[in-house]
Image (cartoon, helix red, strand yellow):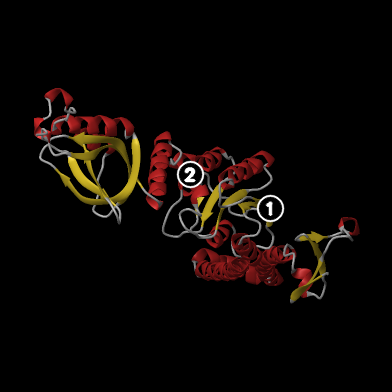
C-alpha cells in the first residue's frame, strides 16, 4: 500500500509561510518598489479622524486607492480637500498587515490640470507680494498727455488693431510704437520680458502697454510668469497691464503701474479724447466771455453806487464843469473794457486754432491726400521707397497699391 500525501516524510514537505509571513513578504516587495510615487485621481469620502489624520479614497472610473494623510502633513500643507476634487498626490505605498490591505501615505498634494496652474499662480503671487513688488510705493503715475506709446503684444493679434484704432480716433497726435512678442506658448514670457527691457533701454516712449486679447488660463499664462513680473517691476517707464480678462487678475496686473481690463480700455485710459478737449476749449471760451461780462456789470454797479455818494457828487459837479473831459473819461473806460474783452476772446480763439493745426488729418478735410508706407506718413520724396507697397489716404478712405 502506497503512502498518501499526508503520510509523506516531514523532511520532504516544502516550507509553507504563514499568513503573517506571506503578508510580510508582500509588504517588503510593494513598499520597496512603490516609494515616492505620484498618482492622480478624484478625492472621495475625505474624513478627519479624532486624532486629526485624514482618510480618503483616490479613485478614477476603474479603480480605487485608499490614502492616509497624517495630521502633521495636513498642518504643513494647510490642506482642505473636498469631495470630487481632482488632485495629484505624492507619497509612499504602505501595506497594513492586520487588515491585509495596502494604502498610500500621502506627503504632498497639488491640484490637477487647471488647478495646478492656479496653485502655481497663488504661490508666485504670495512670493512677489512678500518681496514688495505689488506695493503702491512703486507705482508710477501715467502721463496726462503722452506724445508716444509703446505696445508689447502680437503684431498679428486683434488686440493691437483695437488699440491703434482707438488711439487714432481719440488722440491722432500720438505716435504708436509696436514691439512684437508672442503672447502665448513656451517662448512668450521671455519675449514679453525682452520687449519690455528693450523699451526701457531705448527710452523712446512716454508710457508702455503690455497685453493681449482674452483666452483661457493656459493662453494667458505668460503674463503670470515671474520673468515678466520682474521685467515690469524693473522698468522705469510707466506700464499698463492690459490682459483681456475683465474678472480675473494676472501677476502682471498686480506689478504694473495701472491695470486695464482690456486692451481697448488701456488705450482709453492713456490718452484723452480730442473731441472732448475741443468741447472743453469751447466751454472755457464761454466761461471767459461770461466772466468779462460779469466783471463789467459789477464795475458799472460799483460806479453807480459811488456816483451817488456826496464826495462823488462834488466830483461830478467838477466833471460837469469840465464838460468835454467827462465825455472823454467815459469813452476811455468803455474802450478799455472792450479792449479787455477782445484780448480774452483772441486768446481763446488762438488756443483753438493751435489745437486744430496739430490735427494731422486736417489737410485731408481740405481735399489733400497723404502717402503711407508701413503705417508711416511719407512727408518727403526722399522718404518714399518705390519698391515697397504704399497707401494713398483721402478724408473718406484709403487705397492700397498692388
Image-quadrant location for residue 72:
top left
Residue in the foreground of this view, choosing between 384 and 116? 116
Query: How far from the left and from the top, in percent, is residue 310?
Result: 50, 66
Question: Who's the residue at 55% across and 71% down the image?
Answer: 297
Q: Answer whether labels 2 and 1 touch (C-beta < 8 Å).
A: no
Residue in the foreground of this view, choosing between 207 and 341? 207
Question: Who's the residue at 69% across and 60% down the image?
Answer: 173
- Few, some or many residues within 10 Å of mark 1 (<14, 14–19, 20+): some
Q: In this view, does 116 lie above or below 5?
A: below
Query: How far from the left and from the top, in percent, is residue 64?
Result: 25, 49
Question: Who's the residue at 41% across and 45% down the image?
Answer: 121
Query: Residue beneath label 1, please?
Result: 177
> Which residue lies most toward the top here?
11
- Residue 59 visible from this viewpoint: yes
Task: Point out the image quarter for the C terminus.
Answer: bottom right
Image-quadrant location for residue 294:
bottom right
Task: Point out the image quarter for the N terminus.
Answer: top left
Q: In this view, does 44 lie above or below 386?
A: above
Query: How far from the left and from the top, in percent, is residue 67?
Result: 23, 42
Q: Tag 1 or tag 2, which sits nearer the N-term?
A: 1
Residue in the foreground of this view, choosing between 101 and 212? 101
Would residue 85 be found to the left or right of residue 254 on screen? Answer: left
Separation (CA) of disc 2 from disc 1: 22 Å
Query: How far from the left and from the top, in percent, is residue 135?
Result: 43, 40
Element type where label 1 sits in the image: strand
- Residue 395 visible from this viewpoint: no
The tag on residue 255 is 2
Amino acid at each position: 500500500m502506497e503512502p498518501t500525501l499526508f503520510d509523506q516524510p516531514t523532511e520532504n514537505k516544502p516550507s509553507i509561510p504563514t499568513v503573517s509571513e506571506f503578508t510580510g513578504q508582500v509588504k517588503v516587495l510593494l513598499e520597496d518598489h512603490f516609494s515616492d510615487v505620484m498618482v492622480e485621481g478624484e478625492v472621495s469620502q475625505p474624513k478627519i479622524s479624532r486624532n486629526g489624520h485624514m482618510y480618503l479614497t483616490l479613485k478614477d472610473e476603474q479603480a480605487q486607492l485608499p490614502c492616509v494623510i497624517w495630521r502633521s502633513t495636513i498642518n504643513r500643507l494647510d490642506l482642505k480637500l473636498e469631495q470630487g476634487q481632482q488632485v495629484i498626490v505624492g507619497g509612499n505605498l504602505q501595506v497594513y498587515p492586520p487588515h491585509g490591505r495596502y494604502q498610500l501615505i500621502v506627503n504632498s498634494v497639488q491640484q490637477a490640470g487647471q488647478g495646478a496652474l492656479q496653485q502655481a499662480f497663488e504661490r508666485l503671487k504670495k512670493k512677489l507680494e512678500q518681496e514688495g513688488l505689488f506695493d503702491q510705493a512703486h507705482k508710477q503715475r501715467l502721463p496726462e498727455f503722452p506724445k508716444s506709446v509703446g505696445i508689447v503684444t502680437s503684431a498679428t493679434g486683434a488686440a493691437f488693431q483695437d488699440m491703434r484704432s482707438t488711439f487714432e480716433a481719440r488722440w491722432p497726435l500720438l505716435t504708436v510704437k509696436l514691439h512684437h512678442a508672442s503672447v502665448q506658448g513656451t517662448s512668450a514670457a521671455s519675449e514679453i520680458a525682452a520687449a519690455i527691457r528693450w523699451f526701457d533701454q531705448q527710452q523712446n516712449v512716454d508710457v508702455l502697454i503690455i497685453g493681449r486679447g482674452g483666452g483661457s488660463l493656459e493662453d494667458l499664462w505668460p503674463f503670470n510668469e515671474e520673468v515678466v513680473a520682474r521685467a515690469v517691476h524693473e522698468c522705469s517707464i510707466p506700464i499698463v497691464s492690459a490682459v483681456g480678462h475683465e474678472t480675473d487678475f494676472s501677476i502682471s496686473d498686480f506689478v504694473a503701474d495701472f491695470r486695464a481690463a482690456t486692451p481697448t480700455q488701456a488705450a482709453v485710459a492713456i490718452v484723452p479724447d480730442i473731441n472732448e478737449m475741443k468741447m472743453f476749449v469751447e466751454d472755457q471760451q464761454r466761461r471767459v466771455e461770461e466772466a468779462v461780462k460779469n466783471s463789467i456789470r459789477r464795475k458799472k454797479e460799483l460806479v453807480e453806487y459811488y456816483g451817488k455818494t456826496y464826495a462823488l457828487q462834488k466830483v461830478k459837479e467838477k466833471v460837469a464843469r469840465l464838460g468835454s473831459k467827462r465825455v472823454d473819461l467815459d469813452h476811455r473806460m468803455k474802450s478799455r473794457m472792450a479792449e479787455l474783452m477782445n484780448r480774452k476772446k483772441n486768446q481763446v480763439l488762438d488756443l483753438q486754432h493751435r489745437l486744430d493745426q496739430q490735427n494731422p488729418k486736417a489737410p485731408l478735410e481740405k481735399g489733400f491726400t497723404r502717402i503711407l508706407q508701413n503705417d508711416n506718413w511719407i512727408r518727403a520724396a526722399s522718404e518714399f521707397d518705390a519698391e515697397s507697397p504704399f497707401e494713398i489716404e483721402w478724408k473718406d478712405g484709403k487705397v492700397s497699391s498692388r
